[in-house]
Image: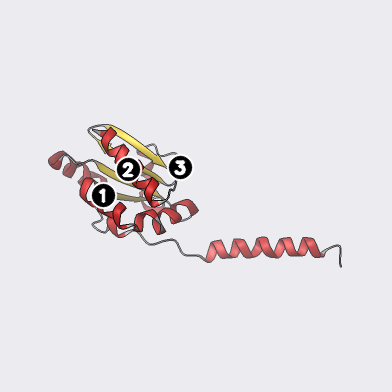
């Protein structure tokens, strides 16, 4: 029995981790996306206003996505920048998979800044400060 104890402990710890990950609910959609603007609507608004489109491609099963949604996307400075400088669009893998595929998103989370055919990609999760810096640079580079 003593020889099996390490194996049993490993199984229990690993099983507990899997159960925790399966039972943990995904982060809610960040409030900055409350308008629920579609990509088509955003393209029209962008043409009218000159603002770039910000697309967040995410998935409920993606841990880095949940971190970004619970972290940087709740930061007041990030929210203010997104609201003032972009037209935000939220695309979830479970419901918008075809649109995400058409945008050629290769990993989650990916933030796209799009304007006049120019696309700047920010891949992965980041702290609020680094995410805001990346957004500023992408908006500047998008034209």
138 in relation to 4, above or below: above
Separation of marks 2 and 3 at Cα, in angstroms: 18 Å
Mark 3 or mark 1, which is nearer to you? Answer: 1
Instruction: Write the residue at 26% across / 36% down.
Output: 140
Q: Which dot marks residue 107? A: 3
Q: Is residue 56 left or right of residue 80?
A: right
Quadrant of the snapshot with the C terminus:
top left
Q: Is residue 115 left or right of residue 68?
A: left
Instruction: Write the residue at 42% across / 47% down.
Output: 109
**Residue 108 coordinates in the image, percent (x, y):** 44, 46
Could you tell me which secondary element the residue under label 3 belongs to? loop
**Dot placed on the residue nearer the N-terminal end, 1 or 2:** 1
Colour mode?
Answer: secondary structure
Q: Which dot marks residue 8? A: none
Q: How many marks?
A: 3
Q: Are marks 1 and 2 in contact (CB under 8 Å)?
A: yes
Instruction: Write the residue at 34% across / 57% down.
Output: 75
Q: Residues within 10 Å of mark 3 (few under 14, many from 20)?
A: few
Q: Is residue 34 left or right of residue 9?
A: left
Q: Residues within 10 Å of mark 1 (few under 14, many from 20)?
A: few
**Residue 33 coordinates in the image, percent (x, y):** 28, 55
**Dot placed on the residue nearer the N-terminal end, 2 or 3:** 3
Quadrant of the snapshot with the N terminus:
bottom right
Q: Which residue is mark 1?
A: 81
Residue 111, picture quadrant: top left
Mark 2 or mark 3, which is nearer to you? Answer: 2
Q: Which residue is mark 2?
A: 135
**Residue 29 coordinates in the image, percent (x, y):** 35, 59
Instruction: Write the residue at 29% across / 54% down.
Output: 77
25 in relation to 62, above or below: below
């Amino acid at each position: 029995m003593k020889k099996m104890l390490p194996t049993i402990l490993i199984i229990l710890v690993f099983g507990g981790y899997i159960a925790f990950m399966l039972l943990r609910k995904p982060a809610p959609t960040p409030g900055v996306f409350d308008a629920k603007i579609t990509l088509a609507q955003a393209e029209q608004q962008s043409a009218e206003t000159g603002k770039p489109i910000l697309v967040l491609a995410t998935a409920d099963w993606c841990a880095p996505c949940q971190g970004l949604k619970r972290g940087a996307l709740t930061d007041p400075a990030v929210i203010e920048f997104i609201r003032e400088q972009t037209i935000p669009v939220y695309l979830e893998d479970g419901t918008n998979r075809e649109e995400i595929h058409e945008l050629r998103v290769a990993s989650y989370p990916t933030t796209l800044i799009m304007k006049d055919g120019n696309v700047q990609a920010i891949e992965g999760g980041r702290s609020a400060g680094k995410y805001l810096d990346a957004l500023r640079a992408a908006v500047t580079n998008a034209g």
